[in-house]
Amino acid sequence: IGLSDTDEAMENLIKVFYRYSGKEGDKYKLNKKEMRNMLQEELAEFLTGSNDSAVVENIMRDLDENKDGEVDFQEFVVLVAALTVACNDFFVDSMKRCPTSE
Ligand SMILES: [Ca+2]
């Protein structure tokens, strides 16, 4: 009770991962279909329509360090970290561009 924001963020990440990874095959890994579902449901604006399957394919290839064709939690956090950095850049950028302090 009374988790910090960071604890909560980590817990949510873990929950999201296992919600999708548990759908089929290995419960602790995302296969391509599960990854695609996860991206579509959780990161819709990241997959901007047009050619999703190529995007999913590339993401899978980049993340799958051990080349077993699936993404485990350790591989998944790399994506989360990359997205968080991108998000932070965007956030810092837009704060610079439109200062709200007045
Ligand atoms: Ca893997």
Image: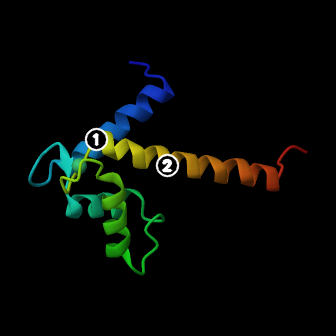
- Pick the residue in front: 90 or 57: 57
Q: Give the class, few, some or many, for how many residues have Cα within 10 Å of label 2's Cα (few <14, many ≥20).
A: few
On residue 73, which mark appears? 1
Q: Find residue 94 and report its image quarter.
A: bottom right
- Which residue is most to the left? 25
Q: Name the residue: 23% across, 53% down.
A: 67
Q: Name the residue: 50% across, 29% down.
A: 5
- Which residue is most to the right? 102
Is 25 left or right of 93, judged from the image as shown?
A: left
Describe the colour scheme in one phrase: rainbow
Q: Position of residue 70 (x, y in %)?
A: 21, 53
Q: Above or below — where is 12 with respect to 66?
A: above
Q: Name the residue: 31% across, 74% down.
A: 53
Q: Position of residue 2 (x, y in %)?
A: 44, 19
How many numbered marks are there?
2
Q: Find residue 12 and report its image quarter.
A: top left
- Pick the residue in front: 62 or 36: 62
Q: Position of residue 49 (x, y in %)?
A: 42, 77
Residue on which disc 2 sits? 82
Q: Above or below — where is 58 with respect to 69?
A: below
